[in-house]
Image: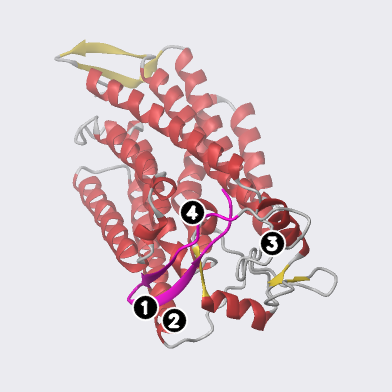
Amino acid sequence: MIWDPIERLLWGIAISISIMSGLFYLNMARKKDFFNQKVILYGFAGLLFGFALTRIFSFLKDFQIIGIFTENTFYGNYDNYTPLYEIFDKLESIFYTIGFIIFILAFEITVKRTKYIITSINIIILILIIISPFNLSRDIFNYTIWFEYFLLVPFILFLYTRWSPLRFKAISSFLLFGLVLITLGNAFGWRSHKQLNFYPLIIGPILFILGSIVIILPILIDPKKIQIVLPYWIFFGILTISILLVKIIIDFIFKMYIGFLIQSIIVFFYSLILFSLIINDIKSEIKSITEKKDIHKKHPSVLQTFSKPQKLTEEEVSISKEKKICLVCKGKVARNNIFLCPECDTFYCSKCSEALTNLENACWVCETPFDESKPVRLPEIKEEEVVVEGVDQKKHDSLTKE
């Protein structure tokens, strides 16, 4: 089985939704005021556009297989195809890799610790895919793509999660599960799975559609509805592990190629470890909040990039003053890079104070104007009681402007 009309229709819908998801991220990046936030969102947009373009060429590639259409299904042999098949196959590999490069580049621009090594390696891989003969190009792609999308991308999301405050951690559970569904959807569209003649042809595009929808939910959902973090991670963890386990069992029963089966087993245990680490990390933070311990993060909040304006906790304000860190970007402030609120002595770095002066022109804590000669532009402020994992905290409205 290669394709049928319903599967073709669903892939068309999947591609459209993936493009729309990428446009959502581009639009959100355009509205951000801070460089790192823009870069991270551009990275996710690039990944989604890469997925969409990959599926377009895969869609066209299937039509180049020589076979027969009978009983509403097209049957053919993947080794018997027209010359255009190899062109579309190479373009599929190229855009898959380009999408990943954009995502990794955004990560390395933000983190700066990896010195662009991962991006450079993948650019070399991309060049090899472009210049290599068809069979070698396919082998290079097959041996690198599973590592990148099943191992490296989830690990980056794991780091993003660890580097962000507790109230933002639910966001990455949506991102990770969405990427898992999209990647599995792509995998079920590959020849290795279709040749088993067990999986319904529609399972690939359905998973891809669901993943594309899940990955944009953090942008669309009211942030207050995803502040209770632990249940989301447990729920998505159970779903991910269950899906991977069922896939391994079916692949084993139907004698999937041993290389792919080993890859699936590695991904299963890797996912189990990542979800366990994140859930344990969340539990530790909840306990720390309950016991009023210092849970300051050494890195800027990454996942806040995906969120609508949130509220500040009194604890964050206290940590900012005690640790002498910028309340906005969470970076340390030096003597030559410091701005103190004249009213409440809250710390801001020079760049963030300039940005806030141009936006709201008011302190996030006490609302004192930074520049008396400019107007203050504040949204309507409410004070409400918010529950974070069973811990009551007073929070003040964030004045960050989208």
Q: Residues within 10 Å of mark 3 (few under 14, many from 20)?
A: few
Kindly identify the amino acid type of the residue bearing the numbered disc 3.
Arg
Q: Mark number for residue 391? A: 1
User: Which of pointers 1 and 2 indicates the residue nearer the eye?
Assistant: 1
User: Which of pointers 2 and 3 indicates the residue nearer the eye?
Assistant: 2
Q: In this orientation, does residue 48 appear? A: no
Task: Name the residue: 47% across, 39% down.
Answer: 142
Q: Please determine whether, in this image, residue 333 is positioned above or below residue 189.
A: below
The residue pinned by badge 4 equals 307
Task: Name the residue: 53% across, 25% down.
Answer: 91
C-alpha gap between disc 4 and disc 2: 21 Å
Task: Name the residue: 63% across, 66% down.
Answer: 367
Q: Residues within 10 Å of mark 2 (few under 14, many from 20)?
A: some
Kindly identify the amino acid type of the residue bearing the numbered disc 4.
Ser
User: Which of pointers 3 and 1 indicates the residue nearer the eye?
Assistant: 1
| Picture quadrant where residue 319 is located | bottom right
Give the secondary structure at mark 4: loop
The residue pinned by badge 2 equals 289
User: Which of pointers 4 and 3 indicates the residue nearer the eye?
Assistant: 4
Query: Mark 2 or mark 4, which is nearer the start of the sequence?
Result: 2
Q: In the image, 203: left or right of 369?
A: left
Foreground pick, 91 / 168: 168
C-alpha gap between disc 1 and disc 4: 21 Å
> Is 387 included in the stretch rendered in magenta?
yes
Tell me where the magenta segment starts and ends, as one range: 378-402
Query: Mark 1 or mark 3, which is nearer the start of the sequence?
Result: 3
Give the secondary structure at mark 1: strand
Q: Position of residue 385 (x, y in %)?
A: 38, 71
